[in-house]
Image (cartoon, rainbow, N blue to C red):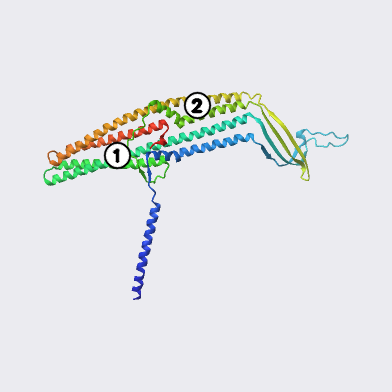
Amino acid sequence: MHAIHSTSYFIPFRRTALAGLLACVVHTAAAQTPTVQRLSLGDAARLAAAQTAGVQSAEFRVQEAQARVTQSRSALLPQFEATPRWTSTTINSASFGFNFPAQPGQPPLLNPNGQIIGPVKFYDFRGQASQALLDFGAVARVRAAKAGVNAAAADIGTAAEQSASTAAAAYVRAARADAALRARIADSTLAAELVTIANDQLTAGVGVGLDVTRAQSQLAFARAQLIAARNDRDRSRLDLLRALNLPLDTPLELTDSIETLPAPETMSETAAVDLAVRTRPDIRAADAQLVAAKQQAAAIRATGLPSLGLFGNDGEAGIALNHLLNTYTYGVQVTWPVFEGGRRHGQEQEQQAVINDIDVRRRDLHQQVAVEVRGALLDIASAREQVDAARERQRLAEQEVAQARERFRAGVAGNADVITASLELNSARTALIDAMTAYQNARVALSRAEGTVTQLR
């Protein structure tokens, strides 16, 4: 009785423990399940512009430029250093030609063949200070360094726009892969339905085995396309996660699809080009680089001007710590580079070449912007017409499939016409997906040309 009572006592306990364990496992699994990231096209562009490696690298370059400003400014601030020193020195009298005459009949004071003198021990505790009073070169270098900060900061915008463009293009590819997968699922559903119809007709004695074989072949083809589409969808998600700098196991939900075709803002070519010139970060970066290069040239020219500064050192020195005497040096110094062997002139020529190069690339960038904007506007108009044509083609292909399927169901024709029509519908669906993808890519290209990718909706 005692054993039975003990067993019945532990059953509720075991059930409670099992329930607690299951609850803990479920809670842990839920905690480990990554949160689904819901993204629109604009969200993806802005997220990439904020956190990708290219943007972070540009931000670090700004920090480097700011550190160079601090380094350049140090030449205008007081400089101080302490140089405590202790030395012990010996010399060879023969090496230095020491020769002290001796009294007649007396031996020489130093060995003519050389004699070690010393060691002489010396203590020197000294501090040195200097202060620039007037240094045109240092001031110009500080200005050039500050201009370099502005140029590096402008590069952040360029990197952000490039990252946003890459992410937007990856988003469009992922949305296209989703649409292609849906189309292949629809193709597989239709192919499976045709197999069912063919089997039913064969069972009823009004069909032939050839129709069943045709339908099964079409189903196998549709499944192969479905497998490829699913793989393409998964690969495109990986590319999108990489473009967004997100963990590769982050689940994504795309809130936009390529079927959504928002009309672009109505704007003339001239207005679009003007907008691009004002907003493109790479143009602003080129302008900042040109300013920085000119400031650097001014800094090089300023090195030929005189500079004025104070200097001094003060300390105690002696041969013993208990007998140190104070010594000092103070003064005002003017430094004026008179002749440097053409070094500064060569630096000026080199910097002027840099300025000319940046200016040429800047003007070429303006031309490139105009071409990109006009090309994107042409692509949008063409893609819009292609979408309309592709939709009409798909509508007719769906109608053809419906008519051929009704004839097949009625037994007045085989399923060869249905198979042919379904293949045409498959091609029409793909063509529509390609046209809508081209339209979305043209939208992204126009935003990239105008420098407004992060403003996409």
Taking the view exactly as shown, the residue that stands out farthest to the left is 205
Disc marking residue 16: none
Q: Which of 447 and 245 is in front in this view?
A: 447
Give left or right: position of 292 versus 122. Answer: left
Q: Is residue 26 above or below residue 429?
A: below
Q: Which of 127 and 433 is in front in this view?
A: 433
Q: Name the residue under label 2.
A: 358
Taking the view exactly as shown, the residue that stands out farthest to the front is 266
Give left or right: position of 441 versus 84. Answer: left
Q: Name the residue under label 1.
A: 180
What distance separates the C-alpha of mark 1 from that of mark 2? 45 Å
Where the C terminus falls, by quadrant?
Answer: top left
Give left or right: position of 252 versus 197. Answer: right
Would you say residue 96 is visible in this rendering?
A: yes
Q: Where is residue 200 in the image (x, y as percent from the top left)?
A: 15, 46
Where the N terminus falls, by quadrant?
Answer: bottom left
Q: What residue type is labelled 1?
A: Ala
Q: Is residue 449 above or below residue 120?
A: above
Q: Position of residue 161 (x, y in %)?
A: 43, 35
SS at badge 1: helix
Q: Which amino acid does label 2 sit on?
A: Ile
Q: Where is residue 133 in the image (x, y as percent from the top left)?
A: 67, 32
Q: Nearer the viewer, residue 435 or 104?
A: 435
Displayed quadrant of residue 10: bottom left
Would you say residue 225 is visible in this rendering?
A: no
